[in-house]
Image (cartoon, grey):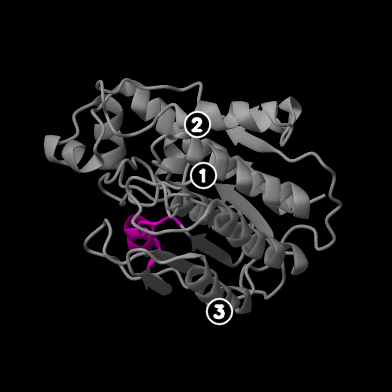
Amino acid sequence: MSCSQNTHFGSSDYIFTRRLKVFYSDKYSFPLPDNHRFPLEKYKLVREKLVNENILSEDELLEAKPADREQILLAHKPEYFDSFENGTIDKNEIRMLGFPWSYELHLRSLASVGGAIESAKEALKNGIGGNLAGGTHHAFADHSEGYCVYNDFAIVSNYLRNKNLAGRIAIVDLDVHQGNGTSSILSDNKNVFILDMFGKNNYPFRKIPSTIDVGLEDGAGDEEYLYLLKNNLQQVLNFDPDIVLYQAGVDTLKEDSLGRISLTKEGLMERDRIVITECRNRNISISLGLGGGYSKPISHTIDAYCGTYKVAKEIFV
């Protein structure tokens, strides 16, 4: 089958059960200075809450296999990968990343990408897959930015195309920050459609154009957000993708310390319901990535992440 054919890859008649395959990589930790504002503990907390509240069962959670060098180079320059792996990366790039370099960070980043690859493959097989990490949309081909080392969705997009697993790929990026790295890497790829909704006055301050960019003013609430999402999502669906890579960041939550948007938890769940339902109704595979979340206390973020999987279970059963 040619990738140019307007035919969905994988099954067009999925058989859904209550069992999802969701990949995690929180066993790969890395050192951070005291009082660093990135809440690394959130990944383990969300996995524990998903199990404790019977949203996911233990056998639905699989430890991610780390991506290898060949996979990372599908979206990144070899010089960048090698310098990050061996710790010779420039200090200015580390400053833009926002994390101190460590080999443990490199390993964790590989595992996060590995989970995204496996989630997408699972979605193409059974309709939906999940990764309890990822959404690293600020990583460029040749450098890191904004807590993002390797760009999972850019790597996955090229992986699926190269392996002839998908012809058309859509990225729906609903993190509060614009996915500048993803757009930079994939801007010339006509087989990838990117819808990006973000806070227009928020980081990054130099945006890289996506297929559709929707910039929101500070304080935007549920009604405005959901209206804009419904309208713009139709153009994604008209692209007729084989798979949607969904960056389901929850830093649009009103309690988020870095967001500046005012969505409620109910609004976020409705956001997820709109995206996931449209994919389910049209037999479009969907792969979930965790994305950003920085609320204080972090419990608001954990609740919102779990809300995404509550919605997924409601729809894909």
Q: Quadrant of residue 203?
A: bottom left
Judge left or right: residue 202 versus residue 75: left
Of the pair 64 and 308, the residue shown nearer to us: 308
> What residue did someone put label 1 on?
290
Indicate whether residue 13 is drawn in magenta: no
The amino acid type, in three-letter code, at marker 2 is Tyr
* SS class, disc 2: helix
* SS class, disc 1: loop
Magenta range is: 175-187
> Residue 231 bears which disc, if any?
3
> What residue did someone put label 2 on?
43
Q: Position of residue 233 (x, y in %)?
A: 57, 73
Assess disc 2: are there few (<14), some (14-19) or many (≥20) residues with their C-alpha within 10 Å of its C-alpha. some
The amino acid type, in three-letter code, at marker 1 is Leu
Of callouts 1 and 2, the N-terminal one: 2
How far is the residue under mark 2 from the one under mark 3? 32 Å
Residue 67 visible in the picture: no
Assess disc 3: are there few (<14), some (14-19) or many (≥20) residues with their C-alpha within 10 Å of its C-alpha. few
Quadrant for the N terminus, please.
Answer: bottom right
* SS class, disc 3: helix
Judge left or right: residue 306 versus residue 42: right
> Residue 305 bears which disc, if any?
none
Do labels 1 and 2 touch, CB within 8 Å? yes
The amino acid type, in three-letter code, at marker 3 is Asn
Q: Position of residue 104 (x, y in %)?
A: 36, 22
Residue at the location (82% across, 42% down)? Answer: 18
